[in-house]
Amino acid sequence: MATTTTTADVSARGRGMTKNEKFVIFASSAGTVFEWYDFYLYATLAPFFAALFFPPGNDTAALLSAFATYAAGFLVRPFGAIIFGRVGDLVGRKYTFLVTIVVMGLSTFLVGLLPTYAAIGWTAPILLVTLRLCQGLALGGEYGGAATYVAEHSRPHERGYTTSYIQTTATLGFFLALLVIGLCRVYMDAKVFAEWGWRIPFLVSLILLAFSVWIRLKLNETPIFQKMKEEGKGSRRPLTESFFQYPNNKYVLLALLGATAGQGVVWYTGQFYALFFLLITLKLEFVSAYALIAVSLLIGTPFFIFFGWLSDRIGRLKIILAGCAIAAVTYFPLFGLLTHYVNPDLEAFQKKNQITVTADTSKCNFHIFVGPWSNFTTCDRAKDFVTKLGVSFKTEHAANAGDKVTLSINNTWNAQSWQQAFTAAGYPAKADLAKVNWFMAELIIAIMVIYVTMVYGPIAAFLVEMFPTKIRYTSMSLPYHIGNGWFGGMLPLLATAVVAATGDIYAGLWYPIGVALMTLIVGFFFLRDTKGVDIVAGSGVEIQKA
């Protein structure tokens, strides 16, 4: 049964945060920023890593391999949530997220020491995947610990506001990764960066790790957890109680489908997929693309705090669901406008030229997880060639065509002659910086980042308030990391595969739109808000609508 804020709590309104409360937020947030920095370095460099850690010869295949490795870190996050969530509910919040940051920092540092594919062959991506798995496990335990730690130090009427600082950390970590990589790319020769300079952002993580460990050692365990342990009310089986006992297992499922799944895809569409779309599809050079995203992150970051604060007044769930709804309705027009304002020449070329790939479609494969086992046919290579140009195309079936593939502006499959055909038709190989409408491009990306802040700003408080103290770390971590790690983290990989398979540069957006609409429906009909719940006395809340 949910309990509401007490009179004493209400009387505390208006009082400024104490020095200890501010330090709790700072120490938890700073460490989490650095952990997100570590995790997103790979994501930011994924298109670049495709040429370093995977075999050459098929650009889309290499990119899919890079995204598959990127996704591996997300796929394992729920397992990290289970492992470290259990430890956090048994041992304590502080020591658990101290361990997670050490694992994350060391894994990231070791990526900076890895040999490339050219040096050791397939051992390179195997080691890279292993380190990504370690990163994912660590992150699976970090977020739930940090959010729970801050929430259990917060006053009830400020829980959305205080936990929203944790919500800024993923974006700030992403911004820090962009900043460090951007500085390296600007101040280093391109050849030097390709040879060894890319390692610097990873090696820097060792310094951040040392600072994070030092500052977190100064923290104490949360008063709510300490009180629970002193009273002997802790759970001896947090995994069983979280996932195998009713009604908590129902709440975990509803939290995933009705909140975190949609939040995850909106988060990764507005930041990562937007970045990859600028770089890979619209052919915008990297400094400009990084700058557009970085500025949008700076513009958007205060809105995490705003929507967290607003959720303390009007509720968490309605803000999250509104963000999902608006994103689902506007993604197609926003990405279409992004093409129009960033690369108008590409838009004009697409309108002028109808591109058709004709092949025996029974030999065209849908590739997601790419590796030595993958078989790329002539049809696959043809689609790869057109996809990497950032243009949409139709695929027509030709029975008994065998391995022969034809293009509407050429007759045979030959990369060199196809390239000549596109060049002759006026294909723009790069976005013309003189024709970019920088203001409108920045505005569009900033709007998508504000969607991110709507769904993400209140989510920590919402999840913390859904579950009782004795299993809170475990229960909230799993739906969060499935929603973000699986639904969100798989987005670049799935969207890229869908675009290559369909020939439509916007088709990948159907995935985040579909998931966001699912969350909107489940959340609206089956969940209610948690604002005002007493997480000290509560042994669980009734979050399902009557």
Image (cartoon, rainbow, N blue to C red):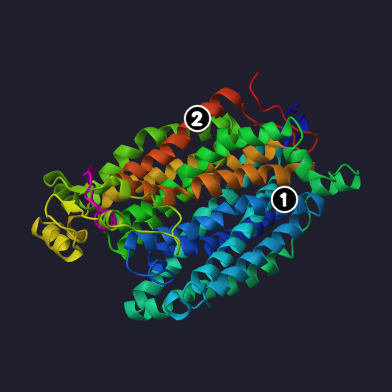
Q: Is residue 176 visible?
A: no
Q: Is residue 380 above or below residue 116?
A: above
Vertical comparison of 270 with 423: above or below: above
Q: Position of residue 412 (x, y in %)?
A: 15, 57
SS type, badge 1: helix
**Viewport quadrant of the N terminus:** top right
Q: Is residue 280 magenta?
A: no
SS for callout 2 = helix
Q: Amino acid at mark 2?
A: Leu
Q: Is residue 339 left or right of residue 70?
A: left
Q: Residues within 10 Å of mark 2 (few under 14, many from 20)?
A: many
Residue 138 point in image, percent of width and height? 64, 59
How far across and how far down the image is residue 102, in percent?
Answer: 67, 67
Mark 1 or mark 2, which has the lower sequence index? 1
Q: Which residue is mark 2?
A: 520
Q: Which residues are magenta?
A: 383-402
